[in-house]
Amino acid sequence: MMQDFSKLHTPTGALGPLPADRDDWQRYRLNDERVEAFHRDGFLAGVQVLDDGQVEALCTELAGLMEPSHPSHKLFHEYHSNESGNPDTILFHALGAWRTGPAFHDVLWSPAFLMAASQLLDGAVRLWHDQLFCKPAHHGGVVAWHQDYSYWTRTQPMAHLTCWLALDDSTRDNGCLYYVPGSHRWNLLPVTGLAGDMNEIMTVLDEEQKQAFHPVPIELKRGQCTFHHPLTVHGSYENRSKHPRRATLVNVFRDGVQSVSDEPLLAGVPVIPKGQKIEGQFFPVLFDPRGVEQGSDAAR
């Protein structure tokens, strides 16, 4: 019988142990300058989260998950072998990999990710959902400009954060992420197509926003991540290189965010009624910094 790892809210050990004590946790803290840069720009790039061995463990699981007949597909909230719908511009996109195997489960508890996320959210870190975005060599598709929170308005208040973690070196040539600095101070924009036209966002920007639209490329080494605010405008271009561009994303929010919908927040998840705190099997607390201060080994 296939195991659903969402029932397990502690790491399996597949990617190594958690820090043993308060001092061990503290070495993962972001300095004040990096936290200030995040709040100024709406993103923070180049945080080292995983080593090569940990990335390889994730890539091994990923290779199986991308096979059409893999039995774990039924555990995903969404699974798109090609979200673009065009065989010449492939964008693999799926939600829920943490449920399918020990490596993708345990990446949620990576210490460098947890410590930084708690600092940037200023509180305890609760899982929203994870994602996979993979572009194959030679014909990988775009991820059009968007703000994450435009897809997440069923949850309030807006106290969310995304960690985008590179499983390959991510470059301009193979379709790296781009951010528009300062766009986290913009209004919530209307939703445009996620796997479509890179120019479509211009139809929903005002003149001031168009003048400020100066995207910057975020090139990362495998195992590094970038964090971004839920309103930061971001996207990525096609992969026409001879190398794949694979990434896993962990979307979290500060503990206390509530449902504002009487529909399931994710496919296959029980309804959390409007006005109730989001919690339970599919939305575990990953890290509470108060546990570190109090000397808890698990920081939970």
Image (cartoon, helix red, strand yellow):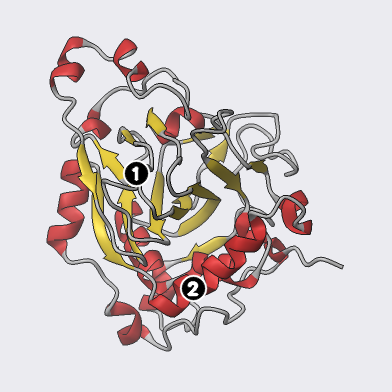
Q: Quadrant of the N terminus?
A: bottom right
Reading the image, the residue beneath label 1 is 175
Looking at the image, residue 143 sits to the left or right of residue 231; the answer is: right
Determine crowd level at label 1: few under 14, some 14-19, many 20+ residues with C-alpha closer than 10 A.
Answer: many
Q: Is residue 184 above or below residue 289?
A: above
Dot 2 crowding, Cα within 10 Å, few <14, some 14–19, many 20+: some
Q: Amino acid at mark 2?
A: Glu
Name the residue: 33% across, 60% down: 169
Q: Position of residue 157 (x, y in %)?
A: 44, 36
141 lies left or right of 37 = right
Residue type indicated by callout 1: Gly
Residue 133 left/right relative to 34:
right
Q: Where is residue 243 shown, x and y percent of the image?
A: 39, 55
Residue extending farthest to the bottom is 20
Which residue, as the protein is rendered here, is positioned at the far right? 1
Q: Depth check: 1 or 83 in front?
A: 83
Q: Could you say which quadrant of the image residue 187 lies in?
A: top left
Residue 60 higher or lower than 259, as above or below: below
Q: Residue 218 in the image: x percent, y percent?
A: 24, 49
Q: In the picture shown, does residue 144 fall above or below 244?
A: above
Residues at marks 2 and 1 touching, judged by CB atoms closer than 8 Å: no
Q: Position of residue 172 (x, y in %)?
A: 26, 46
Question: How far apart are the alpha carbons under marks 2 and 1?
Answer: 21 Å
What residue is at 47 percent from the left and 66 percent from the top?
Answer: 287
Secondary structure type for disc 2: helix
Which label belongs to residue 294?
none
Say left or right for 44 vs 150: left
Q: Which residue is mark 2?
A: 56
Q: Check disc 1 and report its element: helix, strand or loop.
A: loop
